[in-house]
Image (spheres, rainbow, N blue to C red):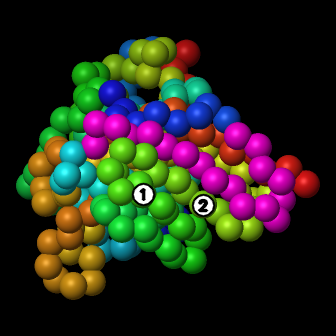
Amino acid sequence: DAKTTQPTSMDCAEGRAANLPCNHSTISGNEYVYWYRQIHSQGPQYIIHGLKNNETNEMASLIITEDRKSSTLILPHATLRDTAVYYCIVSALNYGGSQGNLIFGKGTKLSVKP
Amino acid sequence: DADVTQTPRNRITKTGKRIMLECSQTKGHDRMYWYRQDPGLGLRLIYYSFDVKDINKGEISDGYSVSRQAQAKFSLSLESAIPNQTALYFCATSDSTPGTGYPSSYNEQFFGPGTRLTVL
């Protein structure tokens, strides 16, 4: 079973920041937080990952709480093309073996509206 | 991602038929994965392979088999297809040593476009 809890759906106005929450209260010290998204029925796309510190890349920012029990993915200026299902996944450090595999839950369906 | 291709993209078949789905990648990654996705649900791992000689069962391997013919090719077979195997199938790859030559601790996967399989 997925180790994360996400809202089923969210709306966001185009041009505004989209803040997608994720609860992972049972996360272990050796587990990363990953975010992927899936646009329509395309293959999922990696967005960002983090262990302890906040992370930022060209797509998004990841804010992880100090106790690591929750995180927020931030899309700073959402566009219509960001409409997708966003998956928050926790997975162990991946040095081989199944502990590093990704387990996808149902995710959050983000709808960006004009 | 164009670097990961899947064939066929769509397939309709009948119960009891043998079906093979193929995945090829030009990314030079050593790890490959097969997932299935049912409507409204997340992806579930069927099989994964960390190199040509390494094949592992995932969460839902019953009714499926795989072959890693080369580092770049990973095929999924349904020996005798049944209707509840109707789903969207995705192949993915990842690199155990991205760029640095040292093992990576994180698992960034690159997915193919998917194969929509319908079993009647």
Instruction: Please check the rendered image and state whether residue A17 is part of the magenta-colored stretch, yes or no.
Output: yes
Task: Confirm whether residue A41 shows in the render.
Answer: no
Residue B99, placed above or below residue B91 = below
**Span highlighted in magenta in the image:** A10-27
User: What residue is rendered at 69% in x and 45% in y?
Assistant: A110
Residue B90 in the image: state x and y as whole percent: 45, 45
**Sequence order check, earlier mark of 2 and 1:** 1
Q: Residue furthest bottom?
A: B100
Residue holding disc 2 = A74
Q: Let me know if residue A110 appears in the view.
A: yes
Percent across and percent down for residue A15 are: 82, 65
- Secondary structure under badge 2? strand
On screen, residue A94 versus residue A1, left or right, reads left
Front in this rendered view, residue B10 or A33: A33
Image quarter where the C terminus of chain B lies is: top right
Q: Please name whichever residue, B96 or B72, is drawn nearer the observer in this view of the structure.
A: B96
Marks counted in the figure total 2
Q: Picture quarter containing residue B43?
A: top left
Q: Residue B68 location in percent, x, y? A: 21, 52
Q: Which residue is mark 1?
A: A64
Amino acid on which the number 2 mark rests in the picture: Ile
Q: Kindly identify which chain the residue marked by label 1 belongs to.
A: A
Extreme residue in the front direction: A66
- Element class at badge 1: strand
Residue ID at (58%, 70%): A59
Q: Is residue B45 magenta?
A: no
Label 2 marks a residue whose chain is A
Placement of B78 over or under A107, stated as above or below: above
